[in-house]
Amino acid sequence: MSKLEQAKTAIIRKIQRGDYAPGARLPTRHELMAELGLARASVDKLVGELCADGMLVSIKGSGTYVAGGRETPNLYLILNTELLCVHSQFMERQWNMLIGELGLQQNLTMVGCHELEKHLHLIRKDRMARIVWNRPALSSFGVIEELRKAGYTQALINRAVPEHNWFATDTMHGMETALDALKERMPDATLGIMPAFLNPLEYYLSEREICFYESATRHGFKLVSGPRKTARDQSGIMQAVSGALDLKADCWFIPDHYMTPYVMAGMYERGLKHGRDIHLITSDWNEAPDDTPGLICIRQDWNTMFRSALEWITQEFPKPVQEKIAPGIEINT
């Protein structure tokens, strides 16, 4: 029997004798190294095997515990109804990948907001449940507030709401970085904004507009604003784009990436060239070719927000958190 197998047998016997009681926390890795006379890699392998056997439970940021005395909390991921099916599948793959990568012992249930009522009775019965809301719609905030008052551990992704725990994009940081880059290239440019078609479910678009105005003013740019239309259909969008392009700005900020293809179509109709006649600043527009000239794209760092939420939600006693995550900036000259 190898030294590792002997050490594993010794740990199992201690658990069976009650030296390590159900729910008890195991010594640290360094303490186990000294106690068992093993290297760190061997201790990690031993603990990993016992976790796989169901005898131990490892909780990221907390420690390793003997199974049986404490339940592993169920994790619910609530997806926003505005996400299309393909995006929901992408989100599910990202979350499952991170759970596997971080070695978290969690029961993960993916729930669309439209399915929330079917799962809500299970969540209300499970007082240990941990809940992550991915870009929750305003229609969900009644439930979110109810669960907060009931003491549930929750985190919101990309919704910076007072009195709640959240991990959200630092919109102002992204705007400042984008306009810093633009100022170096076009210090005397006139900037324009394509006003979004605002509705209560997309209040974050207002935040993007405010950040743009404040940052552009600090950078000393001249500003113009296109007309705001109320109808978010093809006709209304094209009217808004046409009215904006009449204003002859050197660079347009498009807070609602849904409008970006229409802006590009309007530019094409007028014979305007990307990177020569007009530059564009967009947020999270994934359809643009990587080499589109004159495009500055502010991309939200979903992976970091997901990872941060997972690491926080699986702590034994998560502390209140409100964390802004800097977005990435892609610049095509």
Image (cartoon, grey):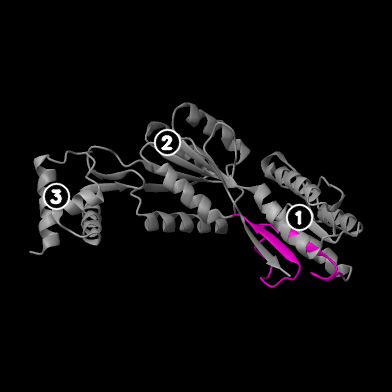
Label whose residue precedes the other's in the sequence (1 or 3) = 3
Q: Indicate the position of residue 91 as horizontal and vertical percent values.
A: 51, 55
Label whose residue precedes the other's in the sequence (2 or 3) = 3
Which structural element holds mark 2? helix
- The reply, left or right, for residue 30 in relation to residue 236 is left
- The reply, left or right, for residue 298 in relation to residue 209 is left
Number of disc labels: 3
- The reply, left or right, for residue 258 in relation to residue 133 is right
Contact between marks 2 and 1 (CB within 8 A): the answer is no
Quadrant in which the N terminus is drawn: bottom left
Which structural element holds mark 3? helix
Q: CA distance from mark 1 to mark 3?
A: 60 Å
Q: Amino acid at mark 1?
A: Ile
Of labels 1 and 3, the one closer to you: 3
User: Magenta residues, as a range?
Assistant: 272-300
The residue singled out by tag 2 in the image is: 123
Q: CA distance from mark 2 to mark 1?
A: 39 Å
Which structural element holds mark 1? strand
Q: Amino acid at mark 2?
A: Ile
Label whose residue precedes the other's in the sequence (2 or 1) = 2
The residue singled out by tag 3 in the image is: 11
The residue singled out by tag 1 in the image is: 254
Of labels 2 and 3, the one closer to you: 3
Q: Indicate the position of residue 49 as horizontal and vertical percent values.
A: 22, 57
Q: Amino acid at mark 3?
A: Ile
